[in-house]
Image (cartoon, grey):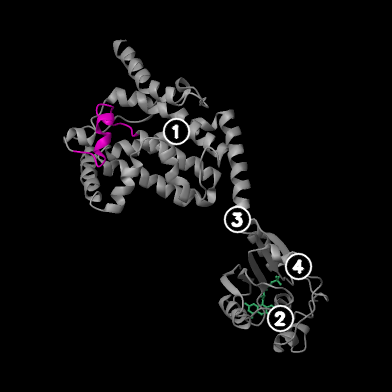
Amino acid sequence: MIKKLFLIAVVALMTTPLFAQQDTIIPFISADKLPDLIKCLPAPPAFDSPEFSYDVIRYQWGKTQRLNPERAAIARRDAVWSYEALLAEFNVPFGLNMSPTETPEIWKLLTTSMYTTDPMRVAPKAFYHRLRPFEMYEEHLLSPETEAELSGEGSYPSGHTLRSWLAALILAEINPARADTLFARGWMYSESRVIEGAHWQSDVDASRVAASIGYAALQTSEAFRAQMAKAQKEFNTLTHKTMKKTLIVYFSATGTTKAAAQKLAQEFDADLYEITPEQAYTAADLDWRDKTSRSTIEMKDKTSRPAIKGRCANIADYDVVWIGFPIWWYTAPTIVNTFIEDHDLSGKVLNVFATSGGSGVEGSYNDLKKAYPQYTWGKCRLMN
Ligand SMILES: Cc1cc2nc3c(=O)[nH]c(=O)nc-3n(C[C@H](O)[C@H](O)[C@H](O)COP(=O)(O)O)c2cc1C
């Protein structure tokens, strides 16, 4: 009973300044409804366990990392205990600058989520009261100015890791295209705690799991889900404004390239434009074994320019244009030349995609690049 009262008192002491400082935030879930990390996670490794030997090895490893000035500078930045400092580290991997004014909904989602799950670390820290590496070895932290604040607070699990891994999970949900780099930065952030000498490796490992436990708990909150929807909407609006506009132009005689174009349009959230021949190609026209078929004749005469229906009226709106076609006789059908010569494509990045019965796309790409050197040619992709 006394132990329980002591724990409650410690929890209250450790959370009060934080709550006072963030008094406008209403948590998505109250602290008493969150999973109990003392029950979810194993106890920190005993001194005579192989896990603790690993902790010691990692502490020594962390000290070698301090010799790398760039890595040490990152670890020092990662030591700053504030939502602002942490989220600033994720701006680049996320692909958008986050702030209360520029991205209010994303900011609210992240700060409220961290504020909601912050208390999860408090009880195990007080319960295990594990000494931090710098305390045990009586050495200095990489950021010695934080020593007084961290001494006696309990090492297990890591509060910085709980926040940063949770932030990575949430940001990856908002922007899945950047998940790889977000998690890589989240991983590095938590490793910074080992480099600091503020945490054992097992503290960090436990907190990555703790963050996923917190993340799962947040999913049960309707308020969290509603705020996530607002954040995703804000992200989409802002990135569409800054994103380059992409057009997928394609010619397809029998539908294969059309399907590839639709996939690309989804991938790049792009508009589609079909090159439609004035006179549609019949099966007989496409017979490549017939020396007198329309396609054979057109492809033999490199100057042929089969007529197309209409023009793409708003081509000027696009920064990136993908040009797609079926490979005919190892290159682009000459109707693609008709399209290119009918439009002003200067100032745009032109990418090429194609489908084929087996031929590669590089030859067709190089042919176009050679024929139209005045344009900027980007990448090419075979989409069989
Ligand atoms: C006239 C003609 C010539 C072709 N030449 C080639 C070729 O040189 N190499 C190749 O791999 N496939 C070749 N193919 C196959 C097409 O590139 C392939 O079937 C393509 O996916 C068809 O796309 P579509 O359905 O969008 O028209 C040729 C097809 C036709 C009709």
Q: Quadrant of residue 280?
A: bottom right
Q: Residue 289: x, y in percent?
A: 71, 85
Segment tinted magenta in the rendering: 140-158
Q: Label for residue 334?
A: 2
Q: Is residue 327 left or right of residue 360?
A: right
Q: Amino acid at mark 1?
A: Ile
Q: Classify mark 2 as within 8 Å of ligand 1 or not, answering yes or no.
A: no
Identify the residue position indicated by label 4 in the image.
312
Q: Label for residue 213?
A: 1
* Mark 2 vs 3, N-terminal side: 3
Per the image, label 3 sits on a secondary structure element best described as loop
Q: Sort mark 4 into few (<14), some (14-19) or many (20+) by Cα contacts within 10 Å.
A: some
Per the image, label 4 sits on a secondary structure element best described as loop
* Mark 3 vs 1, N-terminal side: 1
Depth check: 205 or 98 in front?
A: 98
Q: Residue 269: x, y in percent?
A: 64, 55
